[in-house]
Image: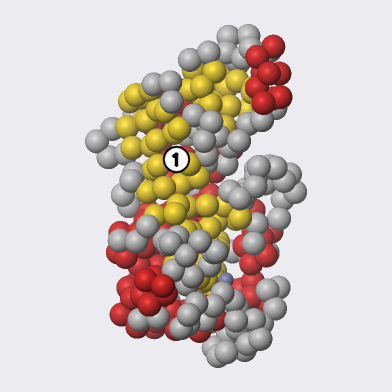
Amino acid sequence: MINRMERLFLGQKPIGIIYATIIILMFSSTSWAGSPYIRSAQAYGRQYLYIQDIASYYGLTLVSNSENCEMRNKWNKIGFTFDKREGMINGYKINYLFPPVRENSIPLVSSSDFQFILEPIMRTYSIPKQTLRTIVIDPGHGGKDQGAAGKKYKEKDITLQIAKKLKNILVSKGFKVYLTRESDSDLDLDMRPEKCRSVGADIFISIHCNAVGKRDISGIETFAMTPEGAPSTSDTKPKIVKEKGNAFNKNNYLLAYNVHSKLINSTGTVDRGVKHARFVVLRNAPCTALLVETGFISNSYEESKLGSPDYQEKVANAIANGLTRYGSLLLGGR
Ligand SMILES: [Zn+2]
């Protein structure tokens, strides 16, 4: 959200032609897709980029009106709503780090969103390569910490059941897999990413269930670590500090997006979007990491699904498919 004072301030200092500068982005010549110039503008104390130029760069067409805009071609559709962080990428909900804006009729998106959201999705071959061999799965909560509780099930039990199913699937695909806990035991949050260090993990997957007072709310949401200098989805204040998990920003996002899209496709449940958070397990992860909220245990329909072995298997399969899709994209697949 942009507060009123910022808007007024911006009104006195119009951006656009006055503050616009042209930056030349250093892209490799082989990845060249369109115009090399992406103009930037300062607004709300941060750097924004012209969506029109980003569209040209990716070889997409920009369609815009006063409320929203979309960059698209035959294969991709990337949607922005001005002054709102919720967006769409190829049919799945995402949340931009900062609200895209329209100033002087120019659609703008923050340079952080370009760097940490659009680039990993649109130019997957440009993100750091990594090995994909050892996976740590983290069933949320355990022991005295039961997590959220529904009418029939506890979060700590469902997360362990899904984690075990996911482990079996990944082992059958040839991965080396560890769980942070194998039984209903207590485990400090700090110890969970620590497990990654001790086994040399390439990927950390934390599994949770959601709960909220409003019992009609349902759906899946997937979290990646918030990039430094940006606010988490539930927050509006950016944090500058760079945490351990920020070493993998682009990989984190590509993994989260692909796991999320497979989950939504395969379960057909409500899409609550790919989000950013600085959860302890994501903040301290020494490798690419994500956290999945597999559904709302506070919603009785979703609770009964989450408790069913078939649905758990479906969720586990979707996570595994998202992971292998991430792997194939890293290798240059489409
Ligand atoms: Zn939880």
The amino acid on which the numbered mark 1 sits, given as a three-letter code, is: Gly
Disc 1 C-beta below 8 A from ligand 1:
no
Q: Secondary structure at mark 1?
A: strand
Q: At 63% from the left edge and 31% from the top edge, which residue is drawn?
A: 2
The quadrant holding residue 15 is: top right
Kindly tell me whether residue 237 is visible in this rendering: yes
The foreground one among 275 and 66 is: 66
Looking at the image, residue 186 lies above or below residue 301: below
Q: Quadrant of ligand 1?
A: bottom right
Which of the image's four quarters has the N terminus? top right
In the picture, measured across the screen, residue 305 lies left or right of residue 48, that is left
Q: Residue 318 at x, y = what percent?
A: 35, 67
The foreground one among 325 and 76 is: 76
The foreground one among 148 and 249 is: 148
Q: Residue 174 at x, y = what percent?
A: 38, 78
Q: Of all residues shown, which one is farthest toward the right?
A: 241
In the picture, measured across the screen, residue 334 lies left or right of residue 184, that is left
Looking at the image, residue 30 lies above or below residue 220: above
The quadrant holding residue 305 is: bottom left
Q: At 53% from the left edge and 13% from the top edge, which residue is drawn?
A: 104
Q: At 57% from the left edge and 22% from the top edge, which residue is drawn?
A: 40
In the picture, measured across the screen, residue 116 lies left or right of residue 260, that is right
The quadrant holding residue 161 is: bottom left
Residue for badge 1: 87
